[in-house]
Image (tube, rainbow, N blue to C red):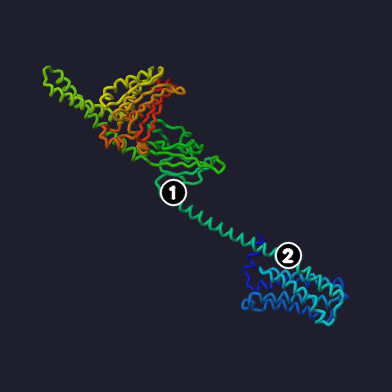
Amino acid sequence: MLFDRGARYFRMLGRRGRTVLFQLPLSGTMLLVILLASVLHPDLKWSAAFVSSLVFHAVLLAACAAVPWDRLPERAVLAIPVLDCLAIGLSREAGDQYLSVLSFLLVFPVVWLSYGPRRSGVMLAALAAVLSVAAPPMILGSGYTSASFIRIVLLPVILGAIAFTAFGVANALRLQRRRLEEREAEVRELLSASEHREQLLATVMDTVSVGVWALDLNGRTVLTNRHDGSWPGLPEEQGAEGAQTQVFGIDRKEVLPPEQYPHARAARRQPFTDELVWIGTGANQRAYSATCRLVPARDGGQAGAVLALTDVTALVEALSAKDQFVASVSHELRTPLTSILGYLSVALDEEGLDPDLVHCLDVAKRNAERLLNLVADLLTVASGTLTIQPRQADLAHVAAQSVESAQPRARAGGVTVTCEAVKPAAGSFDPDRVGQAIDNLVSNAIKYTPQGGTVTVRVGTDDGNLVCEVADTGVGMTEEDLDRAFTRFFRAANAHSSAIPGAGLGLAITRSIVENHRGTVTLFSAYGKGTTATLTLPVAHTDVLAGSR
């Protein structure tokens, strides 16, 4: 840190300040050496030549501070270290024998000359070292001795090596500093980009109408799109015990324990998707769709979780209003349809009716029965609940009955329907409701299978579960159709184009029946090659199911 401060201060100085700063070590050391020599050797001879050399040093220091170096060429300042070498040589030559150590001071100007980025500084340092040895005897008239010639040869070699080393170290330091500055610039750019992304993320999060919480491994909130970390109608953070706001399940009646609150489950890193919860009581009760996703860590583990809560109260109320409307209309339609079917049956019981009239009455009765079945489906969907009365039954027998009932429609459409049941598949379930579900699957398979196709119903057990599979060789479904197949009133595009009758409620009712049995129903389809629907009932839960009804 001290080095960084010094480097910053050095860069802040002008060329004059830097020149003085380079010269001060030599001047200070020269002064210290003279003082120590005077103390340790009181008989030191102060010749006129020696005093003149000291004055020369002082003049050079003054020149460093007085000359406007900023107006001169950049390399003009190198005249100072070259003259320093001459001044040191003069001081050594004019001084006493005890001052021969002044030769060591040549390190200062030599390092100064070789500090620059150019290799010519090393050559200039070597020449300045030769000048410090060769010129003083000529200037002072002392002549050359054998020792002088030895110094002329050896001193430039030694100082040249020092200059070359200083040049290498200085360039290495400059290169390292340049790299550090480049990395510092990159870090600043990354920091600026990170701050920009953080501001963008904060703006986006505060813009969306979804409550978002990012939790760390300890379940603490590290990011939220509400400044106070709250969300209208929610309990205290993390769903901690003692929270005053209650959270209810999807039925709006079952009070969830604190550990089942969305925040608490997210804190335990339990992922879930679009789970509906009701928060609050009375007029302030709101419906939220909760979703939790885990944050992956670099080591493949988990770094936390993100919880999102969407207020879907208006949507749930709109769906409820729609279901109530459908239920009311369906109920009003059911009474006159029952009456119509009754009178049509009475009319058909009359003897001696004209065959054409009997045909017309049969058509009217068949369509009235179809309409009554549609009304029943609408009532089932609108009610949102199904009455399940589980009892011991054989799924193979139920499937066989559905196949037998579907044979007239299959023969009329030129479709072959078969049932494959290797052995009984006994369990505890509602055979009437499950039969209704299989009827829907078989009916769909027949409707969407062209003439000459086949529908196969397979029944068996798998890992303790009852399984019924309905496979056809019909038109199949696209990926988009599969994603929406269980949506109420949805019908595939090929159903509309082929004028296949239906209201789009069969699969929705089937899934509701199966889920009330705590089972699953899945679809697998290849467009143009057929569809396979698999209905699975968990035998392991039949006792619990029976007790809950």
Give the residue number, with chain letter if any, for mark 2: 165
Q: Is residue 359 left or right of residue 500?
A: left
Q: Residue at x 29, y 22 (%)?
A: 407
Q: Which amino acid does label 1 sit on?
A: Met
Q: Position of residue 527 (x, y in %)?
A: 36, 35
Nearest-to-viewer mark from 1 and 2: 2
Dot 1 crowding, Cα within 10 Å, few <14, some 14–19, many 20+: some
Placement of the C terminus among the 4 image quadrants? top left
Q: Residue furthest front?
A: 452
Is residue 426 shown to the viewer in this render?
Answer: no
Give the residue number, with chain letter if any, for mark 1: 205
Dot 2 crowding, Cα within 10 Å, few <14, some 14–19, many 20+: some
Is residue 248 shown to the viewer in this render?
Answer: yes
Number of on-image labels: 2
Q: Where is residue 415 in the image (x, y as percent from the top left)?
A: 30, 26
**Looking at the image, is 540 positioned above or below residue 25?**
above
Q: What element carries label 2?
A: helix
**Cα–Cα span, label 1 and label 2:** 58 Å
Q: Is mark 1 on a helix, strand or loop?
A: helix
Please report whichever mark, 1 or 2, sits nearer to the chain's N-terminal start. 2
Q: Position of residue 451 (x, y in %)?
A: 28, 29
Residue 523 figure quarter: top left
Q: Is residue 418 left or right of residue 226?
A: left
Q: Where is residue 114 in the image (x, y as percent from the top left)?
A: 71, 69
